[in-house]
Amino acid sequence: MKIIAMIPARLGSKRVKSKNLRLINGKALIEYVLETVIKTNIFDSIWVNSESEIFSEIAQKYGVGFYKRPEELATDTSTNDEFAYDFINHTECDILVQILPTSPFITLEDITSFVEKMVDEQLDTLISVEHKQIACIMNNVPLNFKPLEKNPPSQTMEPILAYATALMGWRSESYKHNIENYGVAYHGGKGKTGYFELSGLSTIDIDTEADFNMAEAVVYGKDYVFKSKPEYYSAKCGLRSEVNVPEILSKDGVQINDLFDVNKEVVKIDEILESMPKDKSWSKRLIDTENNSVTIISQMPGEGNRRHFHPDWNEWWYILEGEWRWEIEGYTKKVVKGDVVFISKNRNHQITAAGNSRAIRMAVSRADVEHIYVQDE
């Protein structure tokens, strides 16, 4: 069985000009789908179908085929039925899977599962759809609810399946039969038709400028690290938030604070420790970037920070000198030179200099991390 992928890419576009070539983060829209399709390794061949030779360059760049469709099949009035039928008649295959370049976030798993479903269930047509389980109306007529009855919870409503169109699959012989006998084949016509549900970002289809803006937001936000477990708002009655580090250190009793001479390629910590006072508290920041900050904090016996926690950030310390009494969630232990102390977010903690001389720790966190204090502390 020969299964091929076709990515249709017309140059002309009225609502978003040349959208298939428009760049998002330096890459043409069509390239996002091409990169994903190539990684599936399930197609006998992959083709870009367009009337414009510029897409031939992109196809060559990715090592896939280019099929130049006739100009008359690339107008505003030409249909999917027409250019797909033309392609099938000129490209040998048993199953044609059409993947739209306007769905840049379709996943490798989506495509693989789509093809497997079509083959396993011996379908003539497979259509990607989006699950809508909410009150729906067509031509002012309710589809899955009754206006004169109490509105049921949405999770109990009859779901509606809307075309996602990102993925379409047809068995070639069935497609030809439907076109030649009924003039249409896109929706399945006569034959066994199935539906494949897409969800999340895979359902994004770019038709308008607003859609494109949303796609750009997704691409530029792709490096966001999602939390491993959900967190929820809780009332902060009796709590106080502080984020200004100079003020925080001052309130903690640190007298000398050098927080702005940062990000040098090489610093010698021993030289810093030797040059700073040995009889009063001080801080010296070494690193301050969007990712993290590193600050050396020296305090005298009995001095330390106020008990607090960080709701959104983990923190750790490396003990450079002396002895500290570390208390976390009511549990106290001694830490000394060479120890590494880790404090996970949302855990109350406090560290106090102990012993008979200054104690120094190197705090690794971030400069804008929120500190939450109990009001009466």
Image (cartoon, helix red, strand yellow):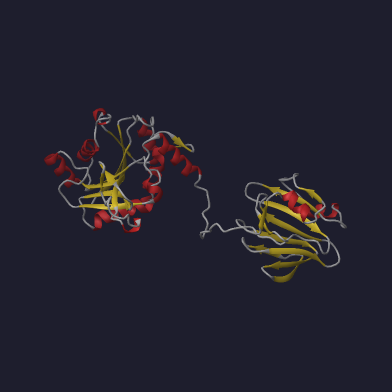
Question: Foreground residue, 258 or 262?
Answer: 258
Q: Residue furthest front?
A: 148
Q: Quadrant of residue 137?
A: top left
- Residue 316 in percent (x, y) is at 67, 60
The C terminus lies in quadrant: bottom right
Q: Residue at x 11, y 41 (%)?
A: 181
Q: Is residue 56 above or below residue 96?
A: above
Query: 344 left or right of 113?
Result: right
Q: Residue furthest right?
A: 279
Q: Residue at x 85, y 52 (%)?
A: 275
- Residue 191 in percent (x, y) is at 16, 50
Q: Residue furthest left?
A: 181
- Residue 283 in percent (x, y) is at 78, 52
- Residue 153 in percent (x, y) is at 35, 57
Question: Foreground residue, 164 or 46?
Answer: 164
Residue 285 visible at all: no
Badge count: 0
